[in-house]
Image (tube, coloured by chain):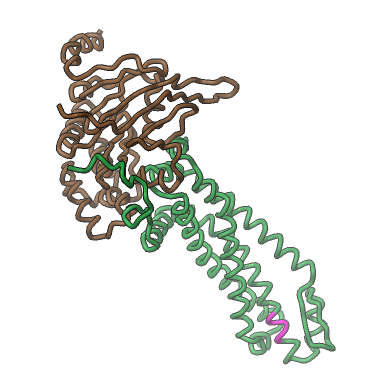
């Protein structure tokens, strides 16, 4: 017979009274959701892939240009300047033009807005599941965590794919414009750093994009979540 | 009968919803005491406020006025963590629309509350299989909800509601989306589990099949308790209710 008298110590925060959702389980559930909603996840991911690819493209182009200026001498300087790079021949440094910087920032902003939009949609679609979770005793933090893990998965995958794609395009671009010299002179370490920077930024954007939708989801009253139309 | 212990106490609960500019009074002051181990049906037509009352008792919604006590604890005083704990361990929910998670298998659905409660995987799986056996779905534990019939989905939901051995089971129109036969089976199942495990079962319904198995019926009308009937009174009036329904 289960106890019906529990007035003593009804709510204490001891070991037997905790509520938890282990990281492993959360991760499995998020991964399952990701697979189950693969198409939607791909759409969310695609804007991230494009923005990060563009970022990586710009960064690696800069790496290639630096390599050319540093080791290839001044012969490339006019060509680079013509292509919109700011080249300082006396110092042997090169930087992107302000216009390009603005386009990159803008594209990242647009991408973030796109992610927020897509994630809001995916949260709305799942109001019911969120309601069920809450009825079964899930804490707000668990719901938040599930969405964050999912966004992290999308973020890492999308950003890595985008960065890799951007690098490939930058190399092709270098090959076409400057010939094989561009591939020989570029520092691979710099390219790798660019890859990491682009991936990290993409990952952060994915997390930033999901924060607002996930907080809305986590704070929902169970009754409202369960009765939500979708 | 031994002295009855009150497990749920509803005190002067009112609930007002805002619909545009209008205020809708779903509950106009309900007082109710529910005893441990009884099978209580809250009966009423749709729109009578029974689902609202049900949500209040389950801590899923907050009353505009009045208080709900579970085990003499005022649930409006609980913080988010305690409320989650209450929903996890103390109360099991069953819904008209089943509300099982479509991406998880029957077994995973049943073990989810146990995971929240910090139970180990093997222990949760074992208990989940036992519960599914109990509701007659032991062999179908790997099926996803969409591969199950409505009656079977509701059985999964019943098994899930018992996951953490709650003291109270709340069932909102558990037979509403089921046909006559599967509905009766679900009720029978609830009734026997109530007796075996000494669990308090509270159902909100307008299904007259539920009356037969109830220890007590509370009729709700226009956001108020219209009348209460005990089992012995019910047997007498049952015939007339059946006739009324047929008319």
Q: Residue visible at 79% across and 81% down?
A: A79
In this rendering, the answer to whether A41 lies above or below B88 is below
In this rendering, the answer to whether B20 lies above or below A19 is above
- Quadrant assignment for the N terminus of chain A: top left
Q: Is residue A43 left or right of residue B242?
A: right
Query: Could you say which chain is coloured brown in the image?
Result: B
Q: Write the start and end of the magenta stretch as one range.
A: A63-67
Location of residue B73 by image quarter? top left
In this rendering, the answer to whether B93 lies above or below B173 is below
Residue A24 on image: x %, y %: 37, 63
Judge by depth and name the residue closer to the eye, B242 or A73. B242
What colour has chain A? Answer: green
Q: Is residue B134 left or right of residue B89?
A: left
Residue B194 on image: x %, y %: 19, 35
Residue A154 on image: x %, y %: 50, 61
Q: Residue visible at 69% across and 77% down?
A: A61
């Amino acid at each position: 017979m289960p106890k019906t008298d529990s007035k003593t110590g009804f709510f204490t925060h001891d070991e037997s009274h905790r509520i938890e959702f282990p990281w492993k389980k959360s991760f499995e559930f998020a991964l399952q959701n990701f697979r189950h909603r693969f198409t939607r996840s791909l759409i969310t991911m695609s804007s991230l892939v494009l923005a990060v690819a563009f970022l990586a493209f710009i960064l690696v182009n800069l790496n290639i240009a630096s390599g050319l200026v540093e080791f290839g001498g001044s012969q490339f300087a006019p060509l680079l300047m013509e292509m919109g790079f700011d080249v300082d021949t006396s110092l042997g440094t090169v930087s992107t033009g302000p216009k390009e910087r603005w386009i990159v920032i803008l594209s990242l902003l647009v991408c973030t807005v796109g992610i927020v939009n897509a994630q809001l949609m995916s949260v709305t679609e799942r109001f019911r599941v969120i309601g069920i979770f809450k009825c079964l005793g899930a804490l707000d933090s668990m719901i938040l965590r599930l969405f964050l893990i999912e966004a992290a998965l999308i973020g890492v995958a999308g950003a890595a794919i985008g960065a890799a794609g951007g690098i490939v395009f930058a190399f092709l671009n270098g090959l076409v414009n400057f010939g094989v010299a561009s591939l020989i002179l570029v520092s691979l370490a710099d390219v790798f750093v660019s890859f990491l920077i682009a991936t990290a930024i993409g990952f952060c954007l994915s997390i930033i994009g999901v924060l607002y939708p996930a907080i809305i989801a986590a704070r929902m009253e169970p009754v409202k979540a369960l009765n939500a139309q979708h | 009968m031994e002295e009855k212990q009150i497990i749920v106490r509803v005190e002067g609960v009112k609930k007002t919803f805002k619909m545009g500019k209008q205020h809708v009074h779903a509950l106009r002051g309900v007082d109710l005491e529910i005893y441990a181990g009884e099978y209580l049906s809250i009966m009423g037509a749709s729109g009578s406020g029974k689902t609202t009352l049900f949500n209040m008792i389950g801590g899923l919604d907050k009353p505009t006025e009045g208080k709900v006590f579970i085990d003499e604890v005022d649930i409006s005083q609980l913080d988010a963590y305690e409320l989650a704990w209450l929903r996890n361990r103390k109360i099991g929910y069953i819904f008209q629309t089943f509300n099982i998670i479509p991406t998880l298998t029957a077994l995973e659905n049943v073990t989810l509350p146990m995971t929240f409660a910090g139970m180990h995987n093997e222990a949760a799986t074992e208990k989940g299989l036992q519960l599914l056996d109990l509701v007659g779905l032991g062999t179908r534990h790997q099926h996803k909800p969409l591969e199950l019939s409505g009656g079977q989905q509701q059985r999964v939901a019943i098994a899930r509601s018992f996951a953490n051995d709650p003291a109270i089971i709340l069932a909102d129109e558990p037979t509403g989306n089921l046909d006559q036969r599967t509905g009766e089976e679900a009720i029978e199942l609830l009734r026997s589990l109530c007796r075996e495990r000494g669990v308090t079962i509270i159902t909100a319904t307008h299904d007259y099949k539920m009356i037969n198995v109830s220890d007590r019926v509370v009729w709700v009308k226009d956001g108020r308790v219209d009348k209460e009937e005990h089992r012995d009174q019910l047997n007498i009036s049952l015939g007339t209710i059946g006739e009324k329904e047929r008319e």
